[in-house]
Each structure stands twice: as C-alpha cells, then as structure tokens.
Image (cartoon, rainbow, N blue to C red):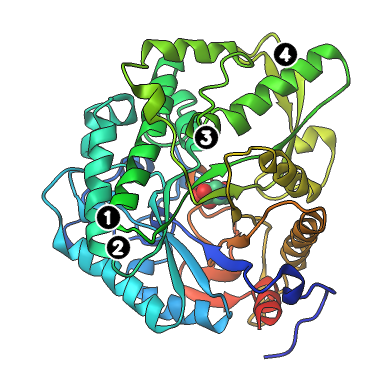
Amino acid sequence: MNKVETSFLHKNQFGDDFLWGVSTAAFQIEGAPDSDGKGRSIWDVFTSQKGKIKSGHHALTACDFYNSYQSDIELIRDLNIPNFRFSISWPRIMPTGVLPVNEAGIVYYNKIIDSLLSAGIEPWITLYHWDLPHELEIKGGWTNRESVNWFSAYVEVCVQNFGDRVKNWMVINEPSVFTGAGYFLGIHAPGKKGITNYLKAMHHVTLATTAGAKIIRNHIPDAHIGTTFSCTHIEPATQSSKDVEAAKRVDTLLNRTFIEPILGLGYPQADLPVLKKLNAYIVEDDLNNLSFDFDFIGLQCYTREVVKSSLLIPYIGAELISAEKRNVISTDMGWEVYPPALYEVLKKFNAYKGIKKIIITENGAAFPDTLKNGKVYDIKRTHYIQDHLEQILKAKKDGLNVDGYFVWTLTDNFEWAEGYNARFGLIHVDFDTQQRTIKHSGLWFKDFLS
Ligand code: NOJ
C-alpha cells in the first residue's frame, strides 16, 4: 500500500498512553435481525414503518457484520487500530428484554470478543446503543420506571458472560440524543413525542446509567467504566442578552442535563426551568442514586451550534441556526465543519472536578464519497480527522485532560433516520455487494497509527 502522507501530525505527539480506536454500534452494522433467536428491537420496528427512514432504507442487512465480523476485524487489524468499540444488541441476548437468555446471542458476542483479542485488538463494549427490545417498549420502554430494573438484569448478564475478557465498558450511549429524538421529537425509535415521555425517559435512563455502572464495578473489580455523552460547542448568534440567555439554555440541555446528575450535581434546573417538571418522577432516594464515580467519560463531538432566542419554540425558547442558513461548510448531516468546537468542549468538560478522564469516543464526518477505480479519495474526511486531532493536541498543550480518540466509524453503515445516505466510514461499503474499500482517510489513519 502506498504511503499516504498529508499532514505533520505524528502519533508520538499524543503520548504513549493515548488510546486510539474506532467506534461502531450493533444496529448500525450487524443486520441479521431475526437470526439465531434474536428478538425485535424498537429500531427493527421503527425501520419497518413507512416514511420513518430517508429513501425507505432499512437495516435488515446493514453491513452484514453479523456474518462478516471476522473479516472486518481483520480490517481493523490491518488499519493498525488497537481499540474497537462496539455495542451489544440487548434483544440479541435477551429477545424479550428479560430472562431467559438467548445462548446463541452470547455465543455470537463471545466470538467477536475472542476474535478481537486474538487479533491483538482491545474490546470496548457499549451496553446500550439505542436498540431497546421491542417487548419492553410495549410496556412503556424508558418511560416506565421498571426500565431501570430491566436494564440492570441485562447488564448482569453481560458482565457475567463477557467480564472475564472485557475490561472497557460504556454504559449508555448519548442519552440526550436517543431520549430527545426518540421520546420528545419522535424522529427516532420508538417514535414517541412530548415533554412527559421525554422527561420520564431522561430520569430513568440516568438512573439506569449509574445502576449499570455499579453492577459492572461489583462484578469486574478491574473494569475501566465509562459512559458516553454527545456534546457540542454552543455560541449565541449575537451578543444580545436574549441570544446569550437562549444559548445558555441550549447549552444546559445539550451539554449539562445528563452529565451533571451523574457527577453528583443534580439536574441543572436553575438554568433550564422545564427540568423542574422532573420532580414529579423523582422518588425517595433517587438523587443519591444518580451519581457514580466513572473512570472515564466518553465525549462525542462533531460540530458547534449557533443559537438565537425564539419565543416560538416551547420549553427552551431558542432555535439553532442551521449551517446551511449560516452559509458555512458542512457535512452530509448538515453539521458545520468547525474543529475548534472539539477544543472548546474539552475545555468545558475539563472544568468539572468530578471527571477523572476524558476520551473522545466518537468524532468523524459524513461526506458524499465516490468509488472510482477501486479507490475512494475522501480528502475532506481525512482533513476533518486531522483538523480535530490538531485541536486535541492544542488542548493537551494547554494542559487539558484528554486520553483517547475513537473515529466514528469503521465502515459506512446505517445512519439511523438518514439511512445509508450519510457515509461516515473509514472503509467504503457497496451495500449491494458488501464489498469493502479502505478510503483515503482509512489509509491515512493506518499510516498515522503505524
Ligand atoms: C452518534 C451516535 O452514537 C452514532 O450512532 C451516530 O451514527 C453518530 N453519532 C453519527 O451521527
């Protein structure tokens, strides 16, 4: 393979202990929704409903990782990537969400873990990356307080079966996104709407996060336990007090609401009054049970948001001004390309005393790739990654804490409501043939990590 040298970045600048990896999620890559006893998830149901996913796409095959995990793991090894983050599909190992366990599901994830370890790749498990068992959704899903117990029983099964070999665990992925999109806006599974559903889900997911973490700690004394949050740098559109206040509310919602209770700071109700409605669902000892001493916090940052005050938007009184309206460079997700956001986010989260370690557990970009003569020259993605790595270096030089960087994602995959239209992979996938082609960004990353 030719050397792909386009920047002055060098791995050594980040230090020997810096963690390099790539992140994925079960529903986005596995396919095989009914194989070997798997139950349906809320995403299996949502994607089967008309009009929910762009271009009518579904994830029945996705990247066929269920069958091709072995060759994809070889690709991870070929790219010199030492850490692989993947999620467990809850309904694959507990088809109805509760006991009994589907042994075939356990066998499958054991095969992945063992293949990774024999390829010299460290497994990083996300326990919940949005694919709730549908049977539990029938009972209210995350809006039902019982969800904390359902989740705890599932975590027990995972740690008992995988904890002997897996040391790196992330409990819940991006709670603000799946509760906001899935329980407030209804644009992600399970398609519920409204403030009541949202706030209930928010509180139960937060309780489940710490409950899950405690179970991991009890079973695996040397576990490295984290949980991952989506975060974004927020700026007011103008310096008017209205816009500044609006930006503060959006910042509270997107960056603080889910992490602060976990750090023992409670919900930030003073800065976002609608959160006071949560008090209706907080019982007994809840506030004491909301915090946990995580070994690391995973931050997932892709862009910044520019905010203006808007009386038309309920609860938050603020509106995001899209990248398109601002006429700035953006990705296929419509997200502005703004690498300094990563530095700003690192600065912001470093200010929390309760955070011991920060790992960037996702960062990456969707661009319209073309496969020509067996090659994908995705120079925009290469630059996106390099520019974000520069921001990490800047943060490190300024003494900020950041201990790892995981690219989103390994292969192009099923991007939720966007279907296959948004390609984020280091590796191109032809979804008709499942042919993999390492993109320029993948070759650059490989070279960088060598
Ligand atoms: C966040 C999510 O964790 C992941 O599932 C998603 O594909 C990426 N960001 C890109 O949107």
Instruction: Quote the CA–CA distance across marks 1 and 2.
Output: 8 Å
Instruction: Quote the CA–CA distance across marks 4 and 2.
Output: 48 Å
Per the image, label 3 sits on a secondary structure element best described as loop
In the picture of the structure, the residue carrying the numbered disc 1 is 219
In the picture of the structure, the residue carrying the numbered disc 2 is 163
Q: Quadrant of residue 4?
A: bottom right
Q: Nearer the viewer, mark 1 or mark 2?
A: 1
Is residue 315 visible in the rendered image? The answer is: no
Up the image or down, 193 lies above or below 96; here it is above
Q: Is residue 338 left or right of residue 230?
A: right
At which x and y percent is residue 30?
Answer: 37, 62
In the picture of the structure, the residue carrying the numbered disc 3 is 263
- Please report the residue visible at 66 percent of the width from the left and 24 percent of the height from the top: 250
User: Does the closest atom of ligand 1 sit within 8 Å of the Cβ of label 3?
Assistant: no
Instruction: Quote the CA–CA distance across marks 1 and 4.
Output: 48 Å
Instruction: Quote the CA–CA distance across marks 4 and 3.
Output: 31 Å
- Upstream in sequence: badge 2 or badge 3: 2
Proximity of marks 1 and 4: CB atoms separated by less than 8 Å? no
Instruction: Quote the CA–CA distance across marks 3 and 1.
Output: 22 Å
In the picture of the structure, the residue carrying the numbered disc 4 is 310
Up the image or down, 298 lies above or below 409; here it is above
User: Does the closest atom of ligand 1 sit within 8 Å of the Cβ of label 1?
Assistant: no
At which x and y percent is residue 427?
Answer: 58, 71
Q: Residue furthest right?
A: 239
